[in-house]
Amino acid sequence: MKKRIFILQIILILSFYSCSKKLVYYERNGLVEFISSEKNTITVKTKSFAESYNKAINFAEINVLENILYRGIPRSNQENPMVNENDVKNNKALNDLIYNDGYRKFLIDSRNVNYQENNGLFYITQEIKFDLNALRRYLEDNRIVRKFGL
Amino acid sequence: MKNKILFIIFFTLLKSHFYSQSSDVVTAQPTIMVIPFAKEKESLRSVYENSEILRIAMTKAKEAFDKRGVNTIDLIAKIKQTNNNSVLQEDQVSDFKDEVIASSGADIYVVVEASKNFSNSGNSANVILTAYDAFSGESLANKTSNSPKIYTDNFEKLVEKAIENEIDNLLNTIQEKFTLILENGRSIVLTVGIENGTSLTMDSEINKDGDLLSELIEDWMEQNSYKSQYHIQGISKNKILFDLVKIPIFGEDGKNFRIRDFTSKFRKYLKLLNFNSSQTIQGNNIVFTISNASK
């Protein structure tokens, strides 16, 4: 009896392991492509993947935001980074903005261009539009960056 | 025990109060004036009045600065004011740009150049924006921008598009320069010369230790330039030229550090050495003339 229970346990563990999805952690990438800019807005296309469709979109949005903030988007109206990454480590307002959905206030549009499911992972291409002016004001109001001037 | 708790609460509140005060960031808002590109002997007003595309470009640039919350000075209003003050005479036209900038009180001036491009594949507009520090004349940022080629004669829209593409980048680059200036200080040029007809030279021994005048001046500069940043271009018998001396933007009290604060300190030091001095300040260029020890 004990042997049967033991085998059953092993089968359960193995089946649980095989059914469980791989967890994907966010990592910034440079797969960002400038699409267009209007007055105070920027539209950027990016690629991302995660174990769920919604999580992949969330990663894509964070990736675009981080690229705007820390690297700047080449050939766009925001070529320079907005923030010096080394100066703002563990800044609560910035962490809230990026990782606690704070950025949604400045997200004008986020539309899926393409997605594929492969081996339980969702690979997406997302077109994302941010309000740069409002974003900059948030950074200034929270003293993450200085207001324009000396 | 109660007292202890009250003390801890009081101390915590006090600490948070001071923290909130110390985190206040002082930002001096600079004023910007947008001016057209003018060739030598061309007055800004005539350039402005004779080019429609330039007027559009300047207005769009000004609009973009205003949107960013930057204080702008209107060129035409300033020219009218300058004319009303009879500052300018016809024969001074070649200095027009400098006169307007000097009298405007602008911290930064942005020179705008705009041109129309016609082609079979569509028309486009080209804009060149160059920002200068009015104080030192140093270039702060340069951007060129082209609008997309479109089959249209509406150059207003094309110029607007070209300006939109680069104006944020221009402001961001200026801000980066500001950050550098805040960190490293502002540059001035200082010449210290000996008045003609005096027996004093830069090689004169000044004190009982046998220190030369040039050595004492250099030591003072090392101690009083911001972060000890200075550079001597050359020393001659009657002149010492510092082609770079850094001074801070804000003084230790947090107030703006003016050139006068620096020159006043230097003048008092020369007085301590028993010298008379006169000074001329023009922009970031300072000339001190030392005369013989006063009796």
Image (spheres, rainbow, N blue to C red):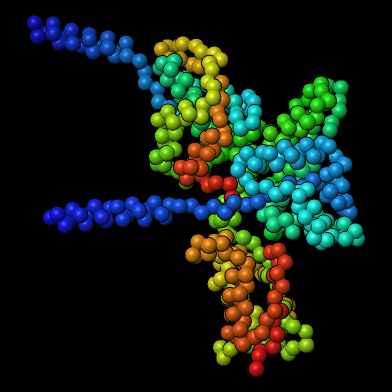
Return the residue found at the far bottom. B295
The residue at 69%/64% (across/down) is B284
In this view, the residue in front, A107 or B103, is B103
In this view, the residue in front, A11 or B210, is B210
User: What quarter of the picture does the C terminus of chain B occupy?
Assistant: bottom right
The residue at 42%/39% (across/down) is A93
Instruction: Answer with left or right where residue B157 lies relative to residue A54.
Output: right
The residue at 55%/56% (across/down) is B183
In this view, the residue in front, B83 or B69, is B83
User: What quarter of the picture does the N terminus of chain B occupy?
Assistant: bottom left
Residue B230 in the image, given as x and y percentages of width and height: 62, 67
Residue A35 in the image, given as x and y percentages of width and height: 63, 24
Return the residue found at the far front. B84
Residue B128 in the image, given as x and y percentages of width and height: 76, 41
B125 vs B259: above or below: above
Tell me if I can see residue A93 in this picture: yes
B295 vs B287: above or below: below
Tell me if I can see residue A70 in this picture: no
Q: How many marks?
A: 0
Return the residue found at the far right. B91
Residue B15 in the image, given as x and y percentages of width and height: 32, 55
Instruction: Answer with left or right where residue B222 lies relative to residue B90.
Output: left
The residue at 78%/31% (across/down) is B156
A124 vs A1: above or below: below
